[in-house]
Image (cartoon, helix red, strand yellow):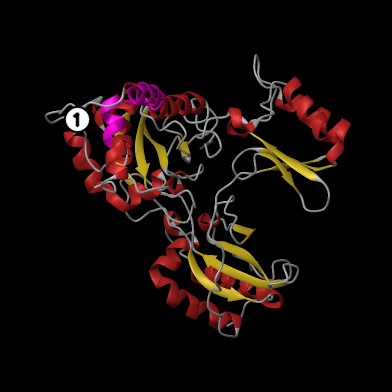
């Protein structure tokens, strides 16, 4: 198979270019802060045991987010693992993959022209065989690698070369001086002038300033504080770190409803509900888009709102905090005024049946749409107050029995119950289930 076309100006693309846009991402094992699996090609750098020598790359192919409501021939797709390639061959393998899409991608139906549809149609084994014909050799099996972790590198981090970098949150990535709010643009200007740092825009719409000597860390924090930017990332809610919104109205002609302009309000609403239900410290990747085209990568999120009409959203659940798989559509037409009422039973079920350390997205993926829907249909608003976390059922709705306990213990239980936003009976029941019956 010919990888290069012989075209004078575009030897790889040829005179017809590619059927659609083509995205490539590169990361190191364990760090999925860039949403590796949404890309046409994803490369994961692996090191030898000495930590200094590049071993090669695990390669994933066929990711993409774009879809259309009520058009089942379009869908979001997470990339598949293609194999492993050594450093000297990685460029040639990438060329072979591009050539396969160039020659075999769908050029007749634009909605199905991304490489994800070619991988889906052929299957990963068929796609691998076709790539190998262009590559000229067998692709090695995927190598073991560290478990994925999502982080956007907010806060201070050691670069490993004696210098430091700091990430800070920016609402929807808008670098501007907000009236009555953070002066992001002016802060960056002063950081570059006074500190001489480099500026990196993250895939999560935030900012990293790097190449900072240790003695200038305090100056960086002073500049950020002076300009109204949170110098202490711990002041953000757990929802802020993973929150993304697309531009939507008024900037995008495809937008059906709002996203970027309203996501600060929605973050506060969702976190307010979670906090009221005793889940305020729970990390959650929350994303929001004004249409189904997927620019805000909603389908990988643990919880996402996808515009489906004016002030109306499709709710997606079941993406994971590791960002390694697509979630599922839970409800199609939810009015913005009904958001809390719709999410309350889902959070209640999560609080009741989650496993230790199980994230919200992984929980939704495990129990599935049917169980969530069935629970929500029978749920009575406010009954989360009767749920003992991890008990697997609602506690306190049956006949209650009294037990005499020491007055000092009762006082301590009363304080703890208030802290956990529970009744004394609920807290005592939880302790009994945990200690005596292993959360029966």
Camera sees residue 406: yes
Reply yes or no: does residue 387 show up in magenta. Answer: no
Q: Residue at x 50, y 32 (%)?
A: 248
The location of residue 260, given as percent across then percent down, is: 52, 30
In front of the other: 292 or 233: 233
The location of residue 189, given as percent across then percent down, is: 81, 29
In front of the other: 375 or 134: 375
The residue that mark 1 highlights is: 396
| Residue 427 lies in quadrant | top left
| Residue 137 lies in quadrant | bottom right
Q: In screen coordinates, is 302 left or right of 201?
A: left
**Figure quadrant of the N terminus:** bottom right
350 w.r.t. 58: above or below: above
Q: Residue at x 44, y 67 (%)?
A: 118
For the record, the magenta segment spans 408-429
Q: Residue at x 29, y 49 (%)?
A: 438
Q: In screen coordinates, is 321 left or right of 69?
A: right
In front of the other: 283 or 256: 283
């Amino acid at each position: 198979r010919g990888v290069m076309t012989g075209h004078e100006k575009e030897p790889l693309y040829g005179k017809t270019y590619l059927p659609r846009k083509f995205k490539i991402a590169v990361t190191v094992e364990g760090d999925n802060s860039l949403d590796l699996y949404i890309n046409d090609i994803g490369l994961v750098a692996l090191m030898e045991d000495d930590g200094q020598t590049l071993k090669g790359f695990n390669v994933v192919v066929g990711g993409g987010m774009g879809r259309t409501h009520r058009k089942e021939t379009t869908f979001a797709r997470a990339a598949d693992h293609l194999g492993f390639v050594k450093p000297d061959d990685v460029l040639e393998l990438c060329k072979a993959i591009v050539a396969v899409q160039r020659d075999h991608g769908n050029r007749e139906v634009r909605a199905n022209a991304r490489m994800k549809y070619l991988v889906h149609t052929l299957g990963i084994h068929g796609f691998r065989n076709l790539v190998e014909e262009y590559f000229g050799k067998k692709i090695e099996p995927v190598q073991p690698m560290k478990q994925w972790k999502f982080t956007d590198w907010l806060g201070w981090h050691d670069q490993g070369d004696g210098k430091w970098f700091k990430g800070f949150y920016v609402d929807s990535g808008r670098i501007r001086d907000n009236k009555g709010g953070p002066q992001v643009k002016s802060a960056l200007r002063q950081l570059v002038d006074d500190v001489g740092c480099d500026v990196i825009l993250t895939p999560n719409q935030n900012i990293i300033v790097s190449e900072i000597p240790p003695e200038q860390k305090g100056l960086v924090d002073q500049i950020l504080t002076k300009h109204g930017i949170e110098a202490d990332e711990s002041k953000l809610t757990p929802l802020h770190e993973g929150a993304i919104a697309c531009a939507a109205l008024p900037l995008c002609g495809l937008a059906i409803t709002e996203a970027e302009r309203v996501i600060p309000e929605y973050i506060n609403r969702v976190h307010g509900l979670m906090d009221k239900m005793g889940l305020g410290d729970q990390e959650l990747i929350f994303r929001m888009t004004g249409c189904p085209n997927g620019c805000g990568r909603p389908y990988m999120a643990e919880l996402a709102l996808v515009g489906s009409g004016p002030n109306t959203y499709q709710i997606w659940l079941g993406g994971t905090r590791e960002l390694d798989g697509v979630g599922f559509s839970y409800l199609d037409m939810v009015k913005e005024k009904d958001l809390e009422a719709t999410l309350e039973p889902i959070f209640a079920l999560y609080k009741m049946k989650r496993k230790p350390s199980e994230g919200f997205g992984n929980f939704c993926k495990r129990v599935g749409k049917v169980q969530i829907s069935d629970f929500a249909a029978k749920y009575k608003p406010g009954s989360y107050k009767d749920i003992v976390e991890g008990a697997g059922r609602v506690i306190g709705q049956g006949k209650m029995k009294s037990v005499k306990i020491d007055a000092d213990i009762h006082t301590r239980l009363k304080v703890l119950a208030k802290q956990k936003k529970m009744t004394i009976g609920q807290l005592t029941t939880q302790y009994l289930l945990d200690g005596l019956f292993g959360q029966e």
